[in-house]
């Protein structure tokens, strides 16, 4: 198993694209971009327990560059995002050439606060930080709606999540202020004295040492959740036997059992019962 950072990958992207790593050596390591927690940890586990492939994992914090790397041939696969995020990226960039291979797990998003222990204690006019990316911003607003903090005039359409914006709010009984912050930086907003609470993706919460189950004031329900994290591959690598084997390993009963044991209800497998 190999590990790299995305910056190292980008620095050599011209060379990687030239030698087409997805097909040049079908018996070699499979390059994949992944968030460190829990995605890379899950990949490390399947790599250790499946002899059909070897993984070359590069760490990412998210962002459009992780999908652009698939399109430009820098790496054949990634594992860090949910499908609404991917659909929004495709809509915003017009890029194609990436395919969803398999949904793997759900990380219920939660609202956190270092100032209040109950969502009912958040005062009128308080500031709430949310992830900036269109899909996760919509997801945060929907979470707040589900718990009575606001009302939206629309529901989630995974293919058009960017339609849910601040303009979609039709009722805001506590006159809350909603501030978008880069997804990977929202955890830092909890230290801002002006921020009462923050909606944080579970992977970033876990990386920052927060327990989505015990620390979250409110959380998404995993049932019927549209935000399953997915294994994605470039169109040229979608049929690579290593990619298909990896998808089988990630969605197996053994991997599901390990995910439940390792993360509890903070990370919920979508298959492998």
Image (cartoon, grey):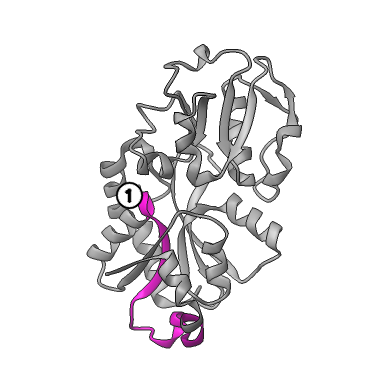
Query: Is 82 one of the magenta-colored residues?
Result: no
* Residue 65 locus on image (x, y percent): 55, 63
Please give the name of the residue rendered at 40% of the width and 39% of the height, measured from the top-left corner. Answer: 205
Please give the name of the residue rendered at 49% of the width and 54% of the height, measured from the top-left corner. Answer: 62
| Foreground residue among 227 and 16 | 16
Q: Answer with the quarter of the image where residue 213 lies.
A: top left
Is 204 situated left or right of 41 in this image? right
Q: Residues within 10 Å of mark 1 (few under 14, many from 20)?
A: many
* Residue 78 locus on image (x, y percent): 46, 63
* Residue 103 locus on image (x, y percent): 48, 54
- Establish if 131 lies above or below 230: above
Please give the name of the residue rendered at 46% of the width and 81% of the height, measured from the top-left corner. Answer: 16
SS for callout 1 = helix
Task: Tell me which segment is drawn in magenta.
Answer: 16-39
Look at mark 1 in the image and give the residue it sits on: 256
- Establish if 179 lies above or below 148: below
């Amino acid at each position: 198993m190999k590990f790299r950072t995305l910056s190292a990958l980008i620095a050599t992207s011209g060379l990687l694209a030239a030698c087409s790593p997805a097909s040049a050596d079908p018996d070699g390591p499979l390059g994949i971009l992944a968030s460190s927690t829990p995605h890379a940890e899950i990949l490390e586990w399947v790599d250790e327990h499946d002899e059909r492939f070897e993984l070359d994992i590069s760490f990412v914090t998210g962002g459009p560059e992780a999908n652009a790397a698939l399109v430009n041939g820098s790496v054949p696969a990634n594992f860090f995002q949910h499908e609404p995020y991917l659909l929004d990226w495709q809509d915003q960039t017009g890029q194609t050439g990436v395919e969803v291979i398999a949904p793997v797990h759900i990380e219920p998003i939660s609202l956190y606060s270092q100032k209040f222990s109950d969502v009912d204690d958040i005062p009128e006019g308080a500031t709430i930080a949310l992830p900036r990316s269109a899909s996760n911003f919509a997801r945060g607003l929907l979470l707040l709606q589900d718990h009575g903090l606001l009302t939206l005039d629309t529901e989630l359409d995974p293919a058009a999540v960017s339609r849910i914006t601040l303009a979609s709010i039709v009722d805001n009984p506590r006159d809350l202020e909603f501030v978008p912050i880069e997804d990977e930086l929202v955890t830092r907003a909890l230290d801002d004295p002006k921020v009462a609470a923050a909606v944080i993706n579970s992977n970033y919460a876990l990386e920052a040492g927060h327990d989505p189950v015990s620390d979250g004031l409110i959380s998404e329900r995993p049932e019927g959740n549209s935000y399953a994290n997915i294994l994605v591959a470039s169109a040229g690598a979608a049929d690579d036997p290593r990619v298909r084997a990896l998808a089988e390993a990630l969605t197996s009963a053994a991997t599901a059992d390990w995910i439940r044991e390792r993360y509890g209800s903070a990370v919920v497998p979508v298959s492998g019962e």
